[in-house]
Amino acid sequence: MYPLNANSYTLLRKLGSGSFGVVWKARENVSGDIIAIKQIDLETGIDDITDIEQEVFMLSNCNSSNVIQYYGCFVDGYTLWILMEHMDGGSVSGLLKMGRLNEQVISIILREVLYGLNYLHGQNKIHRDIKAANILLSSSTGNVKLADFGVAAQLSNAASRRHTFVGTPFWMAPEVIQQTSYGLAADIWSLGITAIEMANGIPPRATMHPMRVIFEIPQSEPPKLDDHFSPTFRDFVSCCLDLNPNMRWSAKELLQHPFIKSAGTVKDIIPLLVQKENKLFDDSDQSVLEETINNTLKPFEEPIAEGNADIEDWTFETVKKSDSTVLGNTSIPKNSIISSQNKEELPSSIKYLEKTIMSDQATPHPFSKSLSEKGSSYHKSLTSDFAMKHYIKSTIRSMLLNDKLSATQRSSLESFYTSFISLDKNLSSKFVNQITPDNRLHHKKQKRSPISQLLFSRWLEETEKRRSLNG
Amino acid sequence: MEDLLNNAKQHLCMRNPKLIRIGLRQVESIVYHVAKPSHDDKIPREIFLKLQDSPLYNSTTPCIYALDSLLEYQQNEEAYEKNFQFIQKLIDDLLHVIEGLVLIHPKSQTLFEDKATLRLFIHLLQPSQPSMLQVAAMKTLVCIMADRPLAIRLFEQINGLQQICVVFKHKQTSQDTRFQILEFFYFYLSPEPYSIDVIAYRKTRTEKQAYLSKYLSNVQGLRDDLDKFQPFGKLDETFD
């Protein structure tokens, strides 16, 4: 149906990316058709794609209005391209970013997914990766389709798992995790988790570490929806989430569940997708606003730069007079905005310079206002960097005043000064930080790290377990 | 307590698995009682820690010696085949006790800042080793390396990270081992302590990520997971 070579397509926009796959919105150049293309990097070690080609061919024969259409695949260099149907409404996961879904919408989506699952299971195909991110929507028709199943998902998961074993266990059925033989019922468990995901915005245990999730799922009671949800919805979820695969309802049976039978039409989803697009527009406005905020910070650089000459000259003269008692004896005014932490950290000469900067009547008010808005971290960063850089400059200048300096040394010092001045803000900041003595290096009593404390409590727990076994 | 520690030490150094087991039980008993939370007398713990500071009474040293002899015993196919379950269990228990010793007495970690000692873990991290020992080795590695950048650097130098990646990617490697290795990767990619004693050996997270990326794909994914799920709690990244 579609040509199997990369030159026939124009990649338009990246729709999403995972560990080993990127999905693009693309146009077939001859017909102008818009499709989705999944690209998978084969350098991760997949040798032969004959099996993949065969499976994609099989997927091409899937004919359900609730399953994404696959068009074929080919290899371009080291990349596998899989051609798929494009759905302009995005995924249910994207919809969830606007907030939780209500039960009416959830029931429609679940029913459509069940139609798709019923079709796949009728052909003895397991999806293996049911979750909100893999349920796609059409913003024009409201249609709901399953995506990223079969080879595309297996390939991504296999490649990812082979190297890092970092997957997404939150939707995994207990028998999948335990690696016992599993079948169609694994998809039903994932569907139940997805239902909770749509209701709560996140799957159960989403804030738990994936490793711990993997250990907990087979051992814990199945998750439930709380009392805020209707009895029929809660019952639907329970029918999906039984630890025993044989006790879970099938897709066909679930289509007869009261929660599903009372679902509305797919057109009811369209208004949500319209809202979603409007939200994206609002987000764009927000980013423009952020740029405006950033721009307002720029003018502050000029006043500082203007004042720079005066400050330099003044300090220059002071150092020339060699009046060290002034530096040493200066105290920080009570109303100074320099925090006590800064007082402890900064050398006294830096404190002196900061006092000068802050007490200068020429300091513009917007600067102070900006500080209060942005908080002390901004202040600390700006004034510390500025003061430190200035301190180094004045130090070098004072050394250049030494008449006893040889011509060679003077020349080297001037070169050093020129080089230092030419460093950009980040680099000069790093340089200064590296050469500044750090009090924290010399903590006499070093506290044990959180990692060590965690390891110890775990060791103690396991020790007690071992002793009870041995005893 | 001195007598008990001395007696345990003698057993552990006998290069005989059955005597090693006796010595190990003795050390384990002391360590457990010293380590467990107690409202009673704190003095035994203080005494134990003082004795551990002394080379004469330090318990980790003979345990390392015992580990070496058990691994050597494992190479003797004929003898090992008769007792392999006993030997494997013994090594597992030994590694667990070593964990406790270094966690209670951090100075003992310095005994592992030695390439020859760290190579014992390379022996344990062969694809042919049973999963139980691979897991135990990974756990112990994290314990001896916690707060010790030098041990980590030396382990890198003997190609330890590379070997771990080999095991991680090996087809026969069990899920248990992979999970434990995963935890090690999270540990490795965490910030290292910042102090005058270790700053010379210190690497930043970015440097470690680059190093690990030589042997493993998608280290950025591990890093992202680490930052998001915080398996070790909130990390102090001040100095990275």
Image (tube, grey):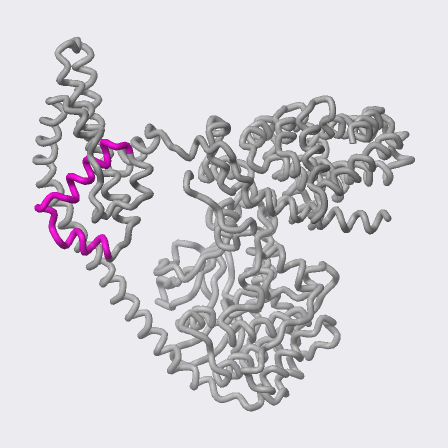
Whether residue B27 sits left or right of residue A132 in the image: it is right
Q: Residue A275: where, in percent of width, then height?
A: 35, 78
Which quarter of the figure has residue A374? bottom left
Point out the stretch of residues depicted in magenta.
Answer: A347-372
Q: Residue at x 57, y 51 (%)?
A: A159
Q: Residue B226: where, in percent of width, then height?
A: 52, 50
Q: Is residue B6 above or below residue A257?
A: above
For the image, the number of numbered tags is 0
Q: Residue at x 58, y 38 (%)?
A: B146
Looking at the image, which is closer to me, A73 or B95?
A: B95
Q: Residue at x 21, y 37 (%)?
A: A331
Q: Residue A329: where, in percent of width, then height?
A: 21, 31
Which quarter of the figure has residue B149? top right
Residue A189 makes an appearance in the image: yes
Q: Residue at x 80, y 40 (%)?
A: B29
Q: Main secondary structure of the magenta part?
A: helix
Whether residue A255 sits left or right of residue B8 in the image: it is left
Looking at the image, which is closer to me, A62 or A251?
A: A251
Whether residue A84 sits left or right of residue A397 in the image: it is right
Looking at the image, which is closer to me, A187 or B226?
A: B226
Whether residue A310 sits left or right of residue A21 in the image: it is left
Looking at the image, which is closer to me, B208 or A95?
A: B208
- Residue farthest to the right, as pictured: B82
Q: Assess whether residue A383 is covered by the magenta stretch.
A: no
Q: Assess whether residue A357 is covered by the magenta stretch.
A: yes
Residue B172 makes an appearance in the image: no
Q: Residue A378: where, in percent of width, then height?
A: 27, 49
Q: Is residue A220 above or below residue A5?
A: below
